[in-house]
Image: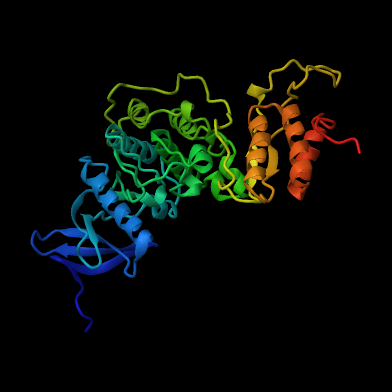
Amino acid sequence: MSEERRFGRYRVTSTIGAGAMGEVFAATDDVLGREVAVKILRAQRTGVAARMVDDRFRQEARAIASLSHPGVVQVFDIDLTADPPYLVMERVAGPSLKERMAEGRLSANELRALGIQIGRALGAAHAQKIIHRDVKPANILAAGPGTWKLADFGVAHVPDSSLTMTGQFVGSPAYAPPEALVRGQCEAEGDVFGLGASLYQAAAGTWPRLEGTTGGLLAPIPPIASVVPGLPEDIAAIIDRAVAIDSAHRPTANDLADALAGSTSSPGATPAHGASLIGLPPVAPARAQVRWQPWALGAGALVLVAVLAAKCSAPQQPSSMGAPGAMPAAQGPLEIATPPMRDGKAAKDWNKVLDHLERGKFSDARKKLGEWERKHGATEETEALRRQLDAMGHDRDGRDDD
């Protein structure tokens, strides 16, 4: 017979799961007689890395404990002096949204209930300046029929925390907002993006970023109505706004929940302000207002810079002549692969190329591209970009005549 495993007064009954940092067990509180979940840190942690993991563990407990909301998994106890340290939380009976989606798409009413409950849970967190930073289907748990809870605040940012360094990316890339991927920055709007992505996948059965190349991580998200034609208009409008590339176009978490609650009588649907997003103009595809970092996607990673109709409003001439730097008609996204960076100067100069592309100044981008090649050498990646710009009519800018 195997020896009974315990953590203080908590007796382990089964294993729930394991990850890079630790394991989660189902357990019974022998004092109160309730079922709980016990999360432990893995052993053999030493040095600075161990202290950072311990800090994240403490931060998770602090974040959850400060939130008293039915949509957030509760924390009951923590012992950082134990070996191994452990965190005791509410045990949620149901599967994660990720597991639930394996059974099929969610219905309209299920989507509304999910958006309302997790939206309000995030709203409560944001009111206390807590940013979850890893909202995704695996971290949304079913607590019962039509009831959802937000879990895993392990990478959350809490007020007065010095743990997260500026520009450090945390979270799951497939569900992270563009500003987090590029700058390592995630505010409340980033959590809304993660919720919108989860709703999108739950409604469509797929999430565009999970398919195709790395470039999809920065590309505009197709309107969900193009994937799920029968989706109710209110849900489609809310999801599209939540996953807008430009964070300024996203609703707050509370507004998202209120908009869904204002159009239904599904469980959890009590509108606070009767908000609605349907009457708002549709979100135009937009480029993220970002500052590219060479570490964001790594050398050779594919990036898509949207050539947008909204940014391509210069009068079109039948002749190829026009004002210097005028943008051509929208021709779809540019495919840009990052060339190998030999040093920091190369990365800085490449940022200049991307900066002009981001603002739609293709002639200036072409000049900077030519300068980059002269300084750092032409590569397959720069030649591919040059060919695309040449095809757009910028074939002489910044190039050597020889």
Q: Along the horizontal axis of the image, is 69 left or right of 126?
A: left
Of the pair 306 and 60, the residue shown nearer to us: 60
Tell me, yes or no, if residue 229 can be seen here: no
* Image spot of residue 143 (x, y percent): 27, 49
Of the pair 199 and 89, the residue shown nearer to us: 89
Tell me which colouring the rendered structure shows. Answer: rainbow
- Is residue 95 depicted above or below 400 in this figure? below
Q: Quadrant of the N terminus?
A: bottom left
Q: Residue at x 20, y 62 (%)?
A: 81
- Is residue 328 depicted above or below 374 in this figure? above
- Is residue 281 depicted above or below 308 in this figure? above
Q: Along the horizontal axis of the image, is 165 left or right of 381?
A: left
* Image spot of residue 222 (x, y percent): 58, 36
Q: Residue furthest left?
A: 31
- Is residue 323 depicted above or below 369 in this figure? above
Q: Quadrant of the C terminus?
A: top right
Q: Along the horizontal axis of the image, is 150 left or right of 33?
A: right
